[in-house]
Image (cartoon, grey):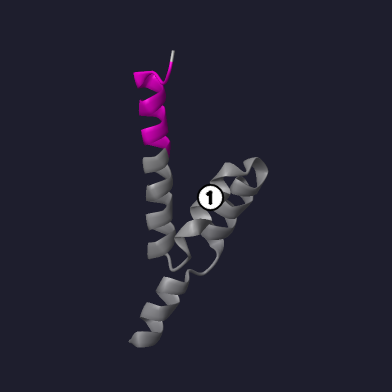
């Protein structure tokens, strides 16, 4: 019984997936903890829509520095 190799593989892929989402949010200028919103079923689709069409703070900061 115990944890199988497949369960460990799935858990490691999920953790890596959330790490990547956090890195993308961080580079966009948002808090990386926004990656946890992906766990909420309907809200995650809404947040992806908002992130896609809202101005990113990182781009605004780069444009104001010029």
The image position of residue 29, as x and y in percent, is 44, 68
At 37% from the left and 34% from the top, the residue drawn is 13
The image position of residue 3, as x and y in percent, is 41, 21
Q: Mark 1 — residue?
A: 36
Relative horizontal placement of residue 47, taking residue 13 as reference (left or right): right
The front one of 38 and 52 is: 38
The front one of 55 and 23 is: 23
Residue 26 occupies which quadrant of the picture? bottom left
The image position of residue 25, as x and y in percent, is 44, 59
Give the farthest residue toward the front: 1
- Is 11 above or below relative to 17? above
At 41% from the left and 73% from the top, the residue drawn is 59
The boundaries of the magenta stretch are 2-14
Q: Is residue 8 magenta?
A: yes
Most common secondary structure along the magenta stretch: helix
Give the farthest residue toward the top: 1
At 48% from the left and 69% from the top, the residue drawn is 56
Q: Name the quarter where the N terminus is drawn.
A: top left
The number of numbered badges drawn on the structure is 1
Q: Secondary structure at mark 1?
A: helix
The image position of residue 27, as x and y in percent, is 37, 64
Q: Name the quarter where the C terminus is drawn.
A: bottom left
- Is 1 above or below relative to 46? above
At 57% from the left and 43% from the top, the residue drawn is 39
Neighbour tally class for label 1: few under 14, some 14-19, many 20 plus, Cα within 10 Å: few
- Is 7 above or below relative to 38? above
């Amino acid at each position: 019984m115990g944890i199988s190799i497949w369960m460990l593989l799935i858990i490691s892929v999920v953790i890596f997936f959330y790490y990547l989402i956090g890195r993308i949010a961080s580079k966009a200028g948002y808090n990386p903890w926004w990656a946890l919103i992906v766990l909420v079923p309907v809200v995650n689709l809404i947040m992806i829509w908002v992130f896609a069409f809202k101005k990113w703070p990182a781009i605004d900061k780069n444009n104001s520095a010029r």
